[in-house]
Image (spheres, rainbow, N blue to C red):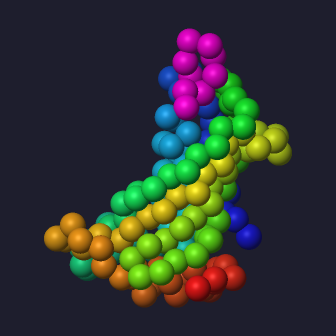
């Protein structure tokens, strides 16, 4: 079951045509990912302090389907897809009143203090397994 985070479109999110500027969808999905991790019961600052790494976006494949407009209330979903080693792959989408506006496959990598990939934190994998159907 995907996690949903609601985001209101503000005037600052739009371009001269009155639609959401394309790069802002990346901000929306970043916020939704952070909230997804929070709902898993994890504190990203504490993970970093404990040497368990930080997440960096390695790859985004985005598909823009329809525009969002000023004052729309978006449902931004985050859904676990799979993982291996230091990589975590998520599917994220933005909907307005049930209509798909944007979708992306996001590949994250867990980085250690030295900036090199390190295995995903065991607490993250345990939380994902507890809250989703974990696919290896």
Q: If the image is split into quadrants, where does the C terminus sit? A: bottom right
Q: Position of residue 88 (x, y in %)?
A: 49, 71
Left or right, residue 42 beside residue 116: right
* Res. 54 visible in picture: yes
Q: Nearer the viewer, residue 66 or 36?
A: 66
Q: Please state which of residues 89 and 35 is positioned toward the viewer in this rendering.
A: 89
Q: Is 17 in the magenta?
A: yes
Q: From this view, report whether residue 83 is shown above or below residue 11.
A: below
Q: Position of residue 115 (x, y in %)?
A: 21, 67
> Is 47 displayed left or right of 3 in the figure?
left
The span picked out in magenta is 14-22
Q: Quadrant of residue 134?
A: bottom right
Q: Residue 96's quadrant in the figure?
A: top right
* Magenta stretch encompasses residue 122: no
Residue occupying image coordinates x 62% and y 13%? 17
Residue at image x 23%, y 71%? Answer: 116
Q: Residue at x 61, y 70 (%)?
A: 80
Residue at the spot x=44%, y=64% of the render?
A: 108
* Residue 6 seen: no
Is residue 1 placed above or below 7 in the rendered structure?
below
108 vs 37, nearest the viewer: 108
Viewer-side residue, 45 vs 100: 100
Where residue 7 appears, as percent x and y from the top left, is: 62, 42
Task: Give the residue furthest to the right.
Answer: 98
Number of numbered tags placed on the structure image:
0
**Magenta stretch: helix, strand or loop mostly:** loop
Looking at the rendered image, the quarter that the N terminus falls into is bottom right
């Amino acid at each position: 079951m995907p996690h949903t985070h609601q985001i209101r479109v503000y005037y600052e999110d739009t371009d001269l045509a009155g639609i959401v500027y394309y790069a802002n969808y990346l901000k929306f999905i970043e916020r939704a990912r952070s909230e997804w991790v929070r709902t898993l019961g994890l504190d990203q600052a504490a993970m970093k302090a404990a040497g368990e790494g930080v997440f960096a976006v390695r790859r985004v494949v985005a598909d823009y389907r329809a525009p969002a407009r000023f004052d729309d209330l978006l449902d931004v979903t985050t859904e676990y897809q799979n993982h291996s080693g230091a990589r975590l792959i998520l599917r994220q989408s933005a909907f307005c009143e049930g209509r798909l506006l944007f979708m992306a496959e996001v590949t994250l990598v867990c980085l250690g203090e030295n900036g090199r990939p390190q295995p995903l934190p065991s607490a993250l994998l345990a939380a994902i397994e507890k809250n989703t159907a974990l696919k290896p």
